[in-house]
Amino acid sequence: MLRGRRRMESTLDAQSLISISLRKIHSSRTQRGGIKLHKNLLVSYVLRNARQLYLSERYAELYRRQQQHYPDGAPLLAMPACPPPPAPPELPVLPLPADTQDREVRSCAAVRGGAELLEGPVCAAPPELQRAPCRDSSPGFYRAAGSAGPGGGGGGGSSAAPGLLYAAGCDFGTGGVPHCSSRTTVLDLDTHVVTTVENGYLHQDCCSQCPCCCQPVAGLASPPPAPGTKRKYYPGQEEEEEGVEEGEPGGGGVAGGPPFAPCTKRARFEEYSAEHPQDSSNISNLISIFGSGFTGLVSRQQADSEQPLNGQLCGKQALASLGAWTRAIVAF
Amino acid sequence: MEQPSLRSLMISPAGCKVGRSSFLLEPEQITWGRSFFLLHPKDNMEGESICEVDSGDGLGADIISTVEFNHTGELLATGDKGGRVVIFQREPESKNEPYNQGEYNVYSTFQSHEPEFDYLKSLEIEEKINKIKWLPQQNAAHSLLSTNDKTIKLWKITERDKRPEGYNLKDEEGKLKDLSTVTSLQVPVLKPMDLMVEVTPRRIFANGHTYHVNSISVNSDCETYMSADDLRINLWHLAITDRSFNIVDIKPANMEDLTEVITASEFHPHHCNLFVYSSSKGSLRLCDMRASALCDKHSKLYEEPEDPSNRSFFSEIISSVSDVKFSHSGRYMLTRDYLTVKVWDLNMETKPVETYQVHDYLRSKLCSLYENDCIFDKFECAWNGSDSVIMTGAYNNFFRMFDRNTKRDVTLEASRESSKPRAILKPRRVCVGGKRRKDDISVDSLDFTKKILHTAWHPTENIIAIAATNNLYIFQDKVNSEMH
């Protein structure tokens, strides 16, 4: 129990560090002398570290609860499996630039400030945990998660071409029966088009490892991405069975590969204004200001052939590849 | 044991009148040979309180941002946040009072940089002087380079102590004479006048940097110098302002791939082809300009692997190198990161040869130091003239000295409160729990707003200049004036 409390403390620390860091980045915009690249780079490292810890804690907890709830050994989740839906470049309703097919946005985790930030990617959460993120409809630019079940829509990782934020994912509902959400809402940060897709889509990543999770839904909006499509996964994914690994999944770039994924588009940040910089709930606005829906939060996959379709991917993908932050800094 | 009577001087950058106090020698100090006291001003003391510069505008424009001795130690330059440079000159030693070694008085004050506005990027460019570097003196004039975030300026400092008198066509006020009154011709004669120090900007090196300039370094060839910003290093010729050569560029093709920035750089003191630059990741790169025009590929990379047991949220921040200095011998480099100073041997790239903990008690406080931004403070470090002692600043107006030979270290405080009449600086101690001696400071009562970021050591003598916010302290070691 004490371990649990300590764990809780560390996750709270991580949360507060994240919100502090975001506040720093935001206030650096108005600092005299312009944005200090060095300082913001260091802040983004802290942000990344805090998020790594938080997410690993969350997954550990997920797995524990899962064990508690399903001690009969038939885990609801073979893994915390709610990978973001693949980038559907052919999604008819979304005007996607052609060159973004191989980019994905793992923006869920990044876009929220403070505690909200960290709930985003946990689409694989057990019902009670998932409710919070999945039911998210944070203001403004973030996704309004459609929800198909009582448990709320999949909070989850969003995988999209850059410039898109959308909520998609597995909705496990209260019954704990995973199924893909039947509705997703997408916001294109570049064109500011908000689109809702009624039917689900194929989560290729998800399904390959978690067949129960994502059934191919009729009305598939788009085919899965081609196998050769470059995906941005965190290198060094651990096996799901062990649950969430503590420590440094991917090491934030240390594990090889550039830690930052390139963003393709700069957000039209001048169109947004952060009226309440201190309001953490508006930090999501802040993030969108920074641009490109945080495409950069996914680190590049080391080998294209590798498809580590770990369910942890969902959350860990959101781990800070610092690119988006840096881009944000440079954008100013 | 002889107790020298020591007096002290604290000078503010604007040269306000100073107070006087002196320090007593403590037994430990004697054995170690370090007995620093504040220098004594020539004028007699009224015992008034020490003047602290505060222009009252609340903007902190008087905060000292850089301190640098010239190559002989005769001159000491300080730059402040308001773009001003104040130069102090050491008075020649007086034979009458042997203990009254030359102290530093204000020599010249000038406005080096003004705030600017970059209209293209809608950015204000701060006038704060980031660095001052003296050029080696080649004639009667002195020259220095001063830089803010964007622009480097070369200033020439000249003295005028004679004035021509007896012009034929002009009268004493300079007005033209009525020619009809001129009846005879005379040769103008130079007459002595009050010393006037003139400072003129001779070169302005502008538009060389996109990012913030963090360091400048004059080459030993005395013809070129380099300036480094976060991502690039440029090589300039001192006489040419309209172009510079880019010698290091670590900007990635995609800014998202950025993982480190340049934090400091310096030319080797003897080899004009070598320079070093430090990064935010804690590594040093030694580059040879003979290898290629663009020195992106380092000749040597100095990096110590991180200790995994010390890993924390802030590992990247505290490993960022804030200052790098070559030793006078050119054999070693000194680096400062947030908690340590390290001595590197140029011949060994795998790890530093010496590591000194400056304030390791802060390791458990990194979170709150992050919140109040103190963790981003960039402390400088300095060698003494013989490379046997290194010095760096800390919080609570403390500064630390480490003797490389004896491995002893001392913590001293630069503040007027700590000065008593006829006393020298008393070593201070920070206690981290456990036994607490009298006069110890506990970690929790450290004042983190009082930070000593900038320190300088006289090139040949044991005189140090310590900048504590908007006050400048100059201390001298009385017992051992010469290097040993």
Image (cartoon, rainbow, N blue to C red):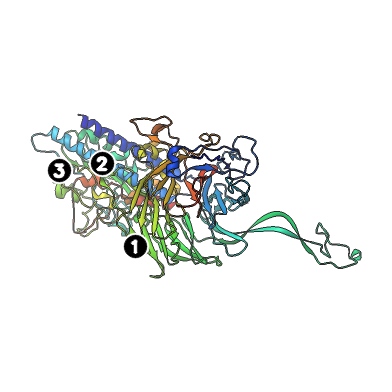
- Left or right, A208 with respect to B354, comes to left
Q: Chain of mark 1?
A: B
Mark 1 burial class by Cα count in 10 Å: few <14, some 14-19, many 20+:
some
Frontmost residue, B21 versus B94: B94
Sequence-earlier tag: 3 or 2: 2
> Given this view, does label 1 or label 3 mark the residue nearer the observer?
1
Cα distance in 3D space between marks 1 and 3: 42 Å
Q: Chain of mark 2?
A: A
Q: Chain of mark 3?
A: A
Mark 2 and mark 1 residues within 8 Å of each other at the beta carbon: no
Residue B10 lies in quadrant? top right
Q: Position of residue B465 (x, y in %)?
A: 52, 47
Mark 3 and mark 2 residues within 8 Å of each other at the beta carbon: no
Amino acid, disc 1: Lys
- Which element carries disc 3, helix, strand or loop? helix
> Given this view, does label 2 or label 1 mark the residue nearer the observer?
1
| Residue ID for mark 3 | A242
Q: Residue at x 52, y 60 (%)?
A: B207
- Picture quarter with the N terminus of chain A: top left
Residue B149 in view here: yes
Q: Residue at x 55, y 34 (%)?
A: B421
Amino acid, disc 3: Glu
Residue furthest to the front: B1
| Residue ID for mark 2 | A55
Frontmost residue, B208 versus A18: B208
Q: Residue at x 91, y 66 (%)?
A: B183
- Which element carries disc 1, helix, strand or loop? strand
| Residue ID for mark 1 | B300
